[in-house]
């Protein structure tokens, strides 16, 4: 009985607690359910409908039928609905934030930020819906060459557990603005945020079949269903590089378009001419957001030799101030990782780094008070070829690496298959211009630790994926060009 009570006690609006699948505008259940637990104390939060092949196909059919009408609605109509959804989400910010913290674990203050962050994509694309303009190309007097921009069709979407609300918003908003319909599988760890979003869309009148949400533990089967269906014309995925590669192979057989937001291994570079206080503030944001569980988190921290010791000392003092707590506490900064497997992975990387010669300046272990939490950790004497600097840590561990020259750090930073985010602190404007070109990443932040917002194109190069989300470019992934020649 501890289950839904915990949630319900906190919810102001119980109608948002949805545990069924949302298909063709209806809430549907099956014989099977899966458990959603709170990562902080493993308490049971809810039993959620576990969809199978039958519901996958039902949802694809619903999205395909709805596409016929939705793709032909006016941009103004779609824009108005998206704006109403945005407003409804903001009105329920606190309920959504509590759901998010309960099922994902992140600090409640960050959860509130995520609701606004995600909602901002919906507002942005409500505006972009009005600016999908085709073209007429020069072709002489007796001929007209028209270029139409049309929605690609049904989009199959798979979202991760680390941003259960924002990643749905970032994909669904441009899809709907373009005139596409969607079938979404949220992560099995965090389906409640996605289902609450669907309820809010339902309340403001998004037509049936336009958004379908399929909670399921059958992730592989879902991936196969959407990549094999001739009715699904595009796949949008945020998650691990390994799963992304698998989906790309499957999508190739059906020649589907893809947007892939995959893993990162972000370098965070501090030059000797940097403002050290600003660099430390930037690193606190970049490293410890969501307890280190973001694909844009600083993963390899390169500090110029001449400022390394001073930086390490000041940084440790800041890290000591981080409050390690239950995410529901307003002051919490470092909270539980998503599951015990994640804790073991971080723990193993730290143990290995120590064996390879890294020194623990702070933290370095699982919290003795709660084994779901890994303590905020600073490691020094890390070498760029240690596993901790080659793998995505996805935890609150900051490995500090020394460098001496600009060329050396460019080579070290680029020496990875990942190419998502990169952070650089320097006061030299010539260096900023050089490095903008030479660093092989989709996103580079100079002198700041936060890189994501709805106005910027989020996305990576190399094995970090393809396509961009957000900004004026984000809608292109959901539009097809059609050339029409009129003689
Ligand atoms: C992610 O970690 O997948 C997304 C991070 C962000 O949107 O900033």
Image (cartoon, rainbow, N blue to C red):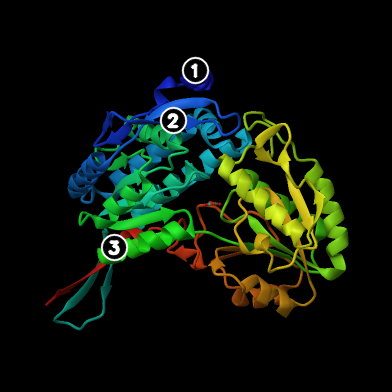
Q: Is residue 149 above or below residue 123?
A: below
Q: Based on the displayed image, in which of its 4 quarters is residue 273 positioned?
A: bottom right
- At which x and y percent is residue 477? 36, 61
Q: What residue is rendered at 75% in x and 59% in y?
A: 355
Query: Which disc is residue 256 wearing?
Result: 3
Q: What residue is rendered at 52% in x and 33% in y?
A: 103
> Which part of the image, by quadrant, shows the C terminus?
bottom left
Count every numbered label the image shows and give the total: 3
Q: Is residue 449 above or below residue 164?
A: below
Q: Is residue 47 above or below residue 276?
A: above
Q: Are marks 1 and 3 in contact (CB under 8 Å)?
A: no
Residue 36 in sight here? yes
Question: Which is nearer the eye, 288 or 366?
Answer: 366
Query: Which disc is residue 35 wearing?
Result: 2
Q: The residue tagged with tag 1: helix, strand or loop?
A: helix
Q: What residue is rendered at 34% in x and 35% in y?
A: 50
**Crowding near pointer 3: few (<14 within 10 Å), some, many (20+)?**
many
Q: CA distance from mark 3 to mark 2?
A: 33 Å
């Amino acid at each position: 009985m501890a289950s839904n009570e915990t949630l319900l006690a906190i919810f102001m609006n119980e109608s948002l607690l949805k545990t069924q699948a949302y298909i063709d505008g209806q809430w549907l259940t099956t014989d099977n359910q899966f458990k959603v637990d709170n990562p902080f104390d493993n308490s049971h939060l809810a039993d959620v409908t576990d969809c199978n092949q039958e519901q996958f196909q039902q949802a694809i059919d619903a999205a395909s039928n709805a596409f016929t009408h939705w793709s032909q609605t006016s941009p103004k109509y779609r824009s108005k609905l998206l704006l109403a959804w945005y407003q409804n989400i903001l009105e329920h910010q606190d309920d959504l934030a509590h759901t998010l913290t309960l099922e994902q674990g992140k600090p409640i203050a960050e959860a509130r930020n995520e609701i606004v962050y995600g909602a901002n994509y919906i507002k942005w694309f409500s505006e972009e819906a009005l600016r999908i303009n085709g073209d007429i190309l020069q072709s002489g007097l007796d001929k007209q060459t028209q270029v139409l921009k049309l929605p690609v069709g049904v989009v199959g979407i798979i979202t991760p557990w680390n941003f259960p609300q924002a990643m749905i918003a970032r994909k669904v908003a441009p899809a709907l603005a373009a005139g596409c319909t969607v079938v979404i599988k949220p992560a099995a760890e965090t389906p409640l945020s996605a289902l609450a979003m669907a309820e809010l869309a339902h309340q403001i009148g998004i037509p049936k079949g336009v958004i379908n949400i399929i909670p399921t533990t059958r992730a592989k089967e879902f991936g196969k269903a959407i990549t094999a269906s001739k009715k699904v014309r595009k796949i949008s995925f945020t998650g691990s590089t390994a799963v992304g590669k698998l989906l790309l192979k499957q999508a190739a057989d059906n020649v589907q378009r893809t947007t892939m937001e995959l893993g990162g291994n972000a370098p965070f570079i501090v030059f000797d001419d940097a403002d050290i206080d600003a660099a430390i503030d930037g690193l606190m944001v970049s490293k410890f957001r969501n307890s280190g569980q973001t694909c844009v988190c600083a993963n390899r921290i390169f500090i110029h030799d001449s400022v390394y010791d001073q930086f390490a000392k000041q940084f440790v003092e800041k890290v000591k101030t981080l409050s390690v707590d239950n995410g529901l506490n307003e002051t919490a900064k470092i909270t539980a990782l998503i599951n015990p497997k994640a804790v073991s992975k971080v723990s193993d990387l730290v143990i290995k780094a120590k064996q390879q010669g890294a020194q623990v300046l702070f933290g370095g272990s699982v919290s003795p008070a709660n084994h779901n939490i890994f303590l905020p950790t600073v490691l020094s004497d890390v070498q760029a070829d240690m596993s901790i600097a080659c793998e995505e840590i996805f935890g609150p561990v900051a490995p500090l690496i020394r460098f001496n020259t600009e060329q050396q750090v460019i080579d070290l930073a680029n020496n990875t298959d990942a190419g998502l985010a990169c952070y650089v602190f320097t006061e030299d404007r010539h260096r900023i211009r050089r490095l903008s070109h030479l660093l092989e990443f989709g996103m580079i932040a100079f002198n700041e630790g936060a890189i994501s917002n709805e106005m910027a194109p989020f996305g990576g190069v190399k094995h970090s994926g393809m396509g961009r989300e957000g900004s004026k470019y984000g809608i292109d992934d959901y539009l097809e060009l059609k050339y029409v020649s009129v003689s």
